[in-house]
Image (spheres, rainbow, N blue to C red):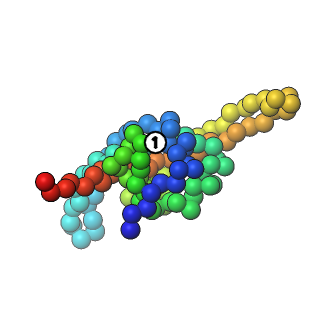
């Protein structure tokens, strides 16, 4: 099934930083060994309230448009292989509203796996 990233959440990806996630090789209990893996990802810092809005999209693959056309993302939340890149505290910022009230915006740092999904067509 091809899911497209909901347009209403495009702003979340606006300031995304492209990073590489490196998973080391692992020796399993049975003596077998998995190879080291490098994956492209998008790293974003978003307000906690935005994170709560996109939580239902976690662990599902979505195709992107715009500058990331031909790529797909998957929000990492609970996958044990990517534990270091699970959502983490992104700090907070103190601000003052137009009415003069002080408030704090809390942030979350999260990663989306980034995959190339371009399809080749026979000429």
Q: What element carries label 1?
A: strand
Q: Residue 80 in the image: state x and y as whole percent.
A: 42, 61
Res 62 seen here: yes
Quadrant where the C terminus sits is bottom left
* Residue at 63 percent of width and 43 percent of height: 47
Say if 33 sits above or below 11 in the image. Answer: below
Quarter-of-image position of residue 18: top left
Between 19 and 24, the one nearer to me in the picture: 19
Residue 4 shown left or right of residue 9 in the figure? left
Dot 1 surroundings within 10 Å: few (below 14), some, or many (20 or more)?
some
Q: Residue 94 in the image: state x and y as whole percent.
A: 73, 32
* Residue at 24 percent of width and 71 percent of height: 30
Q: Which residue lies furthest to the left in this view?
A: 123
Between 94 and 60, the one nearer to me in the picture: 60
Res 41 seen here: no
Quarter-of-image position of residue 52: bottom right
Between 10 and 59, the one nearer to me in the picture: 10
Q: Residue 115 in the image: state x and y as whole percent.
A: 33, 51
Q: Residue 67 in the image: state x and y as whole percent.
A: 39, 39
* Residue at 82 percent of width and 29 percent of height: 98
Residue 121 shown left or right of residue 64 in the figure? left
Quarter-of-image position of residue 56: bottom right
Say if 28 sits above or below 104 in the image. Answer: below
* Residue at 28 percent of width and 47 percent of height: 38
Quadrant where the N terminus sits is bottom left
Q: Mark 1 points at which residue?
A: 43
Residue 79 shown left or right of residue 55 in the figure? left
Between 72 and 92, the one nearer to me in the picture: 72
């Amino acid at each position: 099934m091809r899911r497209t990233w909901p347009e209403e959440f495009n702003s979340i990806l606006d300031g995304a930083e492209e990073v590489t996630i490196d998973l080391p090789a692992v020796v399993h209990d049975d003596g077998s060994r998995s190879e080291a893996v490098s994956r492209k990802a998008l790293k974003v810092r978003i307000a906690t309230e935005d994170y709560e809005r996109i939580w239902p999209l976690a662990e599902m693959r979505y195709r992107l448009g715009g500058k990331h056309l031909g790529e797909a993302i998957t929000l990492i939340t609970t996958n044990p292989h990517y534990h270091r890149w699970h959502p983490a505290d992104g700090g907070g910022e103190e601000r003052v509203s137009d009415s003069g009230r002080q408030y704090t915006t809390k942030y979350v740092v999260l990663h989306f796996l980034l995959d190339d999904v371009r399809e080749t067509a026979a000429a």
